[in-house]
Image (tube, rainbow, N blue to C red):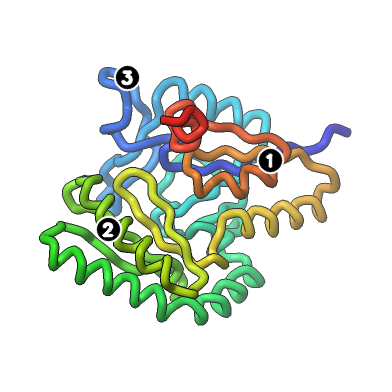
């Protein structure tokens, strides 16, 4: 009997993207929605074809920075487990969190909550003093504070450049186990215990315990996805991705 195939796939900017990132005039299909029901993310015809292929041949397991609520508004027929909150929560098939992994995150979050709040406050003070329009907040889910998210309200990546430089300066002199991840207009500051790689490794082991030998594929666009992708048997990278730009030296 052939081994079962599992694809661990990032979502935003990997399987789909916001409309502004889609080609003009393309026949788009909605992929995810805002809370008010407005379609916000879309698949191109090529992405629709690729996703259909994946779902026919593999079990697709989303691995996303989205929280559980935002993930619930992704309407692409996913029916299996999902990794959300940068790996902080693993959702079972019924949509409820894996209890063992939830308790792990609760315990580990106690060690990072104070430094995340300090970094959030530093970003807010810096933005205020420099006149930058930045939204900085701690992203929590299931009552667990996971990471700091900073975005320009105006999509000004030059402003995020300044926030990133300031944040890196803080991290350089800090002994806290946190690191920053930048992708376009998004800057995330994560504790080291929060990593998609850890969650995918845990879930892959559970799948092997259930199914025996399996074949795993990892797919992502961001440098923060490389960890879990490298642990899979095969890795897939979209052409228009941060990973591909890095590989090409762009």
Which image quadrant is residue 125 in?
Answer: bottom left
* Residue that appears at 54% across and 32% down: 237
Q: Position of residue 136 (x, y in %)?
A: 27, 64
Q: Residue furthest top?
A: 25
Q: Mark 3 near mark 2, Cβ–Cβ under 8 Å?
A: no
Q: Position of residue 115 (x, y in %)?
A: 41, 77
Where 101 falls versus 36 (above or below)? Answer: below
Badge 1 or badge 3: first in the primary sequence: 1
Residue 239 is left or right of residue 80, and the answer is left
| Quadrant occupied by the C terminus | top left
Where is mark 1, residue-wise? 6
Assess disc 1: are there few (<14), some (14-19) or many (≥20) residues with their C-alpha within 10 Å of its C-alpha: many
Residue 211 is left or right of residue 176, and the answer is right
Where is mark 2, residue-wise? 163
Distance from Cα at disc 1 to Cα at disc 3: 29 Å
SS at mark 2 in the image: helix
The disc label shown at residue 26, or none: 3
Q: Position of residue 95 (x, y in %)?
A: 54, 59
Assess disc 3: are there few (<14), some (14-19) or many (≥20) residues with their C-alpha within 10 Å of its C-alpha: few
* Residue that appears at 43% across and 58% down: 180
Mark 3 against mark 2, which lies toward the viewer?
2
């Amino acid at each position: 009997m052939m081994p079962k195939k599992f694809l661990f796939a990032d979502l935003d900017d990997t399987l789909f993207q916001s409309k502004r990132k889609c080609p003009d005039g393309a026949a788009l299909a909605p992929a995810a929605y805002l809370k008010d029901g407005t379609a916000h993310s879309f698949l191109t015809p090529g992405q629709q074809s690729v996703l259909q292929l994946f779902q026919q041949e593999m079990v697709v397991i989303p691995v996303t920075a989205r929280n559980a609520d935002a993930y619930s508004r992704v309407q692409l027929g996913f029916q299996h487990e999902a990794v959300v909150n940068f790996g902080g929560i693993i959702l079972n098939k019924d949509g409820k969190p894996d209890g063992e992994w939830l308790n792990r995150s609760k315990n580990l979050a106690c060690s990072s909550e104070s430094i995340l709040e300090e970094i959030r406050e530093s970003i807010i003070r810096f933005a205020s003093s420099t006149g930058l329009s930045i939204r900085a907040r701690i992203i929590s889910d299931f009552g667990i504070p996971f990471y700091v998210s900073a975005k320009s309200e105006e999509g000004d990546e030059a402003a995020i450049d300044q926030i990133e430089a300031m944040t890196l300066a803080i991290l350089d002199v800090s002994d806290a186990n946190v690191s920053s991840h930048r992708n376009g207009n998004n800057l995330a500051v994560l504790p080291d215990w929060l990593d998609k790689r850890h969650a995918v490794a845990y879930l892959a082991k559970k799948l092997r315990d259930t199914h025996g030998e399996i074949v795993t594929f990892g797919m992502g666009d961001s440098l923060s996805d490389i960890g879990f992708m490298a642990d899979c048997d095969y890795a897939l990278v979209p052409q228009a991705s941060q990973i591909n730009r890095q590989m090409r030296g762009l």
